[in-house]
Image (cartoon, helix red, strand yellow):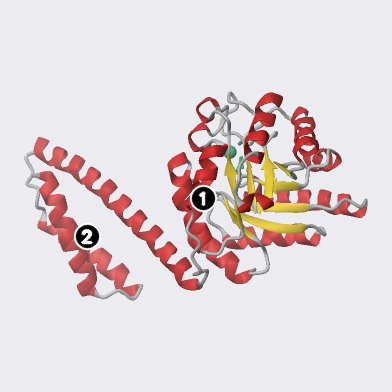
Amino acid sequence: MIIAGPCAAESEAQVQETARALLSLQSPLYGGLVFRAGIWKPRTNPDTFQGVGEAGLAWLRCVKERTGLPTATEVATPEHIHLALAAGVDYLWLGARTTANPILVQSLADAFADAARKGARCTVLVKNPVNEDAALWIGNIERIERAGCEVMAIHRGCGHRPCWTMAHTLRTQRPDIPLLIDPSHMGGSAERIAPLLQKGFSLGYDGAMVEVHPHPEHALSDSKQQITAAALDAILHGLRYEQHADGLNFLRAELDEIDDQIWQLLVQRMAISERIGVWKKQHAMSALQPTRYEQMVGDRVAWGTQQGLTEETIRGIYDLIHAESLKRQK
Ligand code: PEP
Ligand code: MN
């Protein structure tokens, strides 16, 4: 299943142009194509584009009538749910900021339950919360399930970090829930979409949600991470279909992410070390401060050995880090 379309519906023409471009693509994957567009946008800053609101529902309906594609939009209040269902939107998703708040999610679950009692069929896509919290993600899914909806999960990462461990936990505890990857929000940039999609597919994800805009550079939101329909088509055709949807691939993705963080932290550490070097020079202090070093490593050894690391390993790592730091302070 590929859910594609703009971050936000901006105008009727932009929505129709994107839908037409997606429909003209040739890929077996497009058998499961769904058209997405956000109309109520959860933006960080109140001065930015907040979405066109209710007016966009008519545009989505038009896409459905003209192309036959099912449609999807984000809902964040009970009123959004009633309006979107009444307008015939097929898939409703809960965004990462919404799913960070269980009280809000429960009020949405109540609205879905109400709609289900009145005969509506709801399929709800639950994004992971912005914070790395697998238990909250799973709890949100349960709330929506209890409302009588069909549920799928969207892994969109935390900030611009994938948080593979969180997704692995969901996959292990709820293998019955279809899991989609959202490489657009996970990576935050057009260049990262292809490698993240590849990773998701090699981990056995069931589909993807990708932001597609006819002119990404002019998009009113998330312009850096949107791609054209033709670019999406090229990425999908370039994917390798590996048959390794097992735990090992997930664990390796988790390991790669931790190493990434280790390297980023090391770079940050060295930058601070350089600033300390400047301070020492200004105060006629020598770069090597043996008492401070011994005290620092002693602290790390005490903590690390409690966590099951050996003193030899910790000292070995710190000797290397410290040697690099000293070079920076020369
Ligand atoms: C979106 O899909 O456009 C969106 C706002 O996503 P998220 O909730 O993942 O930030
Ligand atoms: Mn977006």
Residue at screen point 22% across, 66% down: 298
The spot of residue 193 in percent (x, y) is 48, 46
Q: Amino acid at mark 2?
A: Met
Q: Is residue 102 visible?
A: no
Q: Which residue is mark 2?
A: 296
Of helix, strand and loop, which one carries label 2?
helix
- In which quadrant of the rendered view does residue 73 lie? top right
Residue at screen point 35% across, 55% down: 260
Q: Is residue 14 left or right of residue 244?
A: right
Q: Amino acid at mark 1?
A: His
User: Which mark sits nearer the N-terminus, 2 or 1?
Assistant: 1
Q: Which corner quadrant holds the C terminus?
A: top left
Q: Which residue is mark 1?
A: 237
Of helix, strand and loop, which one carries label 1?
helix
For the residues labelled 2 and 1, the Cα–Cα distance comes to 52 Å
The spot of residue 13 in percent (x, y) is 68, 24
- In which quadrant of the rendered view does residue 138 lie? bottom right
